[in-house]
Image (cartoon, rainbow, N blue to C red):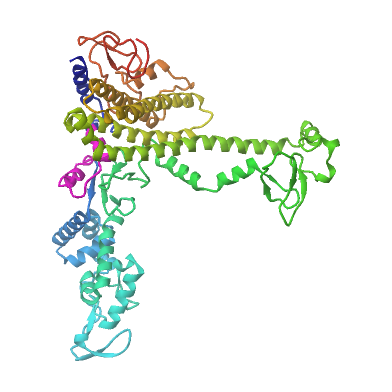
């Protein structure tokens, strides 16, 4: 009964937890729902997939499928057509010109209708009057045709059907510029609408034009963007200025709406851009060459030393033999200069300061390379761990939960805490990955901020490793069990508690980085005691942070045994049972 009471208490505390992991304001939504929305693996055959997509972060963005885009596009065209009393073809030309901004169309039209018509190419009357004769000459091929085989735009310039078809086909095959197609006459600015495209273009060209037309609604609209995931056809309609830029598409890919890179909060887009550029640039290759090679004294090609001897021979056609240490000709060396593994000339020159500058540059390059490697390896390792966690989460949802439910004789609804733990692991791995990019660009002279950052990062990483270990290793024992385990409820309590504590660690890490580590005062000092309480999820607030501070999991006195017979750990605030002498979460003694 004690273990069940513990689970109920922890579950109730988790439900009353403070703001969502990244919301940071009063508009926050439930963190459990947000996590599920972030990484739910959607079955395409499920009837609930549309509902799941429609409920993702309704506060500041909406996921749009192709049908949604077409409907919104048609609604905007109809609205402009009705208000301005123009045809739908003309309304679509206007909206396309003004990047699908209905308000911009209305403002410009009512400010100066004549100017708008002239600029866009919407003529009120033909420039050339169509004669009453039975035959006319095409303006492109100069052949004479019956009037029923000639077609004109609003301007009235006549062209034969074959010339129109060739002109339209060429424009469509040239790309999206066909959406702003004008009359073939060089001196005419009249717009060619979709009605003429549908009448004269081939089926293949009409399909291309239709795709360009739909895509323009997303690509030319400042409030919408395509999901950057490969093969995804969803678009995201975003409320600009509404807070975080992190969004999750209907395909389950999370990305930053502002820069369209993968979701990277709490690191800003500028830092991410610099980091990605650095990872792909040739600068690190040059740093490695500078740090680990020396130029041949004769041909100047860089040479890496791969043997213990100081006698170096350049590759053909140079074949110059020289000393690795002093770069002098090997013919001047021998036993009298120190032999194969030393060089008296080099040591003497080094004491005299001859090689100081070159060695200093090489040492600086080596230190820079080592520092970059330190951060990059950890960034890449957490990325790989996150991908593995995503795969484990999918396997857990599709295979293991059902198996565990049968073994432990519990409904899958009672095993939600396992899915929540894996969702938290996936999210924390993403955050931890980007904190290494943040740390790389943190100025060296801001020593106080660096110490505080590394402390926050270390505490968060330590909590995450405990959670990951519990979800990955300890759960296996219950999956491999032959029947119900007596201590499964204790495992439930431990995993739920680790999930909550880890969430608190990362909440405070994210808020601190977003606030520019403002807890560090002007002298570069920070309060370790305050930081420790804040990291543990206590009631202290992060200075300058948005929204409310984290709420303590225990409702009684923070350091004494509460009414339910539990004691709260001073380090992580976890509510342990009365008989425990060591915290089940952080392993600190009572």
184 relative to 20, above or below: below
The residue at the far front in this view is: 482
- Name the image quarter holding residue 157: bottom left
Instruction: Tell me, yes or no, if residue 59 can be seen here.
Output: yes
Instruction: Tell me, yes or no, if residue 441 can be seen here.
Output: no
196 relative to 290, above or below: below
Residue occupying the point 76% across, 33% down: 350
Q: Look at the image and say whether residue 58 sits in the magenta stretch.
A: yes
205 relative to 334, above or below: below
Residue toward you, 20 or 576: 576
| Quadrant (top left, top right, bottom left, bottom right) of the N terminus | top left
302 relative to 528, above or below: below
Residue toward you, 221 or 13: 13
Residue occupying the point 34% across, 74% down: 170
What's the magenta region? 32-59
Does residue 174 appear to the left or right of 483 in the view shown?
right
- Name the image quarter holding residue 586: top left
- Name the image quarter holding residue 577: top left
Q: Look at the image and say whether residue 417 sits in the magenta stretch.
A: no
State the image coordinates of residue 415 (x, y, percent, origin top left). 21, 30
State the image coordinates of residue 358 (x, y, percent, origin top left). 70, 39
Give the total of numbered labels: 0
The residue at the far right in this view is: 336
Residue toward you, 173 or 560: 560
| Quadrant (top left, top right, bottom left, bottom right) of the C terminus | top left
State the image coordinates of residue 346 (x, y, percent, origin top left). 78, 36
């Amino acid at each position: 009964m004690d273990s069940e009471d513990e689970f109920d208490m922890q579950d109730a505390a988790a439900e009353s937890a403070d703001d969502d992991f990244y919301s940071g304001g009063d508009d926050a939504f439930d963190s459990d729902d947000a996590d599920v929305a972030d990484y739910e693996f959607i079955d395409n055959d499920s009837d609930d997939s549309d509902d799941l997509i429609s409920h993702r972060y309704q506060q500041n963005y909406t996921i749009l499928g192709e049908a949604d885009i077409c409907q919104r596009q048609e609604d905007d065209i109809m609205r402009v057509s009705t208000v301005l009393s123009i045809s739908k073809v003309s309304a679509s030309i206007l909206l396309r010109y003004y990047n699908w901004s209905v308000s911009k169309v209305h403002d410009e039209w009512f400010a100066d209708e004549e100017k708008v018509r002239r600029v866009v190419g919407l003529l009120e009357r033909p420039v050339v009057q169509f004669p009453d004769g039975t035959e006319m000459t095409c303006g492109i091929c100069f052949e004479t045709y019956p009037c029923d085989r000639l077609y004109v735009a609003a301007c009235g310039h006549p062209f034969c059907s074959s010339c129109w078809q060739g002109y339209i086909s060429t424009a469509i095959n040239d790309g999206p510029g066909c959406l702003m197609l004008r009359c073939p006459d060089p001196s005419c600015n009249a717009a060619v609408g979709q009605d003429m495209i549908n009448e004269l273009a081939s089926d293949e060209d009409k399909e291309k034009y239709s795709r360009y037309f739909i895509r323009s609604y997303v690509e030319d609209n400042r409030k919408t963007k395509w999901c950057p995931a490969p093969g995804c056809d969803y678009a995201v309609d975003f409320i600009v200025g509404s807070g975080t830029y992190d969004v999750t598409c209907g395909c389950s890919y999370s990305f930053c709406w502002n820069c369209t890179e993968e979701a990277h909060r709490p690191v800003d887009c500028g830092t991410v851009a610099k980091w990605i550029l650095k990872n792909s640039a040739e600068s690190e290759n040059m740093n490695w060459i500078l740090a680990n090679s020396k130029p041949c004294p004769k041909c100047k090609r860089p040479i890496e030393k791969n043997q213990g001897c100081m006698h170096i021979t350049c590759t053909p056609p140079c074949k110059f033999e020289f000393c690795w240490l002093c770069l002098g000709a090997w013919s001047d060396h021998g036993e009298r200069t120190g032999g194969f593994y030393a060089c008296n000339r080099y040591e003497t020159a080094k004491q005299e300061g001859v090689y100081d500058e070159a060695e200093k540059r090489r040492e600086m390059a080596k230190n820079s390379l080592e520092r970059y490697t330190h951060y990059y390896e950890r960034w890449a390792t957490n990325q790989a761990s996150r991908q593995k966690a995503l795969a484990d989460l999918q396997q857990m949802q599709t295979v293991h939960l059902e198996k565990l439910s049968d073994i432990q004789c519990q409904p899958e609804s009672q095993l939600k805490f396992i899915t929540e733990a894996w969702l938290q692991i996936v999210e924390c791995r993403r955050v931890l990955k980007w904190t290494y990019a943040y740390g790389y660009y943190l100025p060296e002279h801001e020593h106080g901020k660096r110490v505080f950052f590394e402390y926050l990062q270390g505490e968060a990483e330590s909590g995450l490793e405990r959670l990951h270990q519990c979800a990955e290793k300890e759960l296996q024992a219950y999956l491999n069990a032959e029947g119900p385990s007596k201590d499964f409820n204790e495992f439930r309590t431990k995993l739920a508690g680790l999930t909550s504590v880890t969430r608190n660690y990362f909440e405070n890490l994210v808020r601190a980085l977003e606030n520019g580590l403002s807890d560090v005062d002007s002298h570069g000092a920070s309060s370790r005691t305050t930081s420790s309480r804040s990291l543990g999820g206590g009631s202290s607030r992060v200075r300058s942070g948005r929204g409310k501070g984290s709420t303590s999991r225990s409702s009684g006195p923070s350091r004494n045994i509460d009414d339910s017979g539990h004691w709260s750990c001073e380090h992580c605030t976890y509510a342990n049972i009365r008989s425990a002498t060591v915290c089940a979460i952080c392993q600190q003694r009572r």
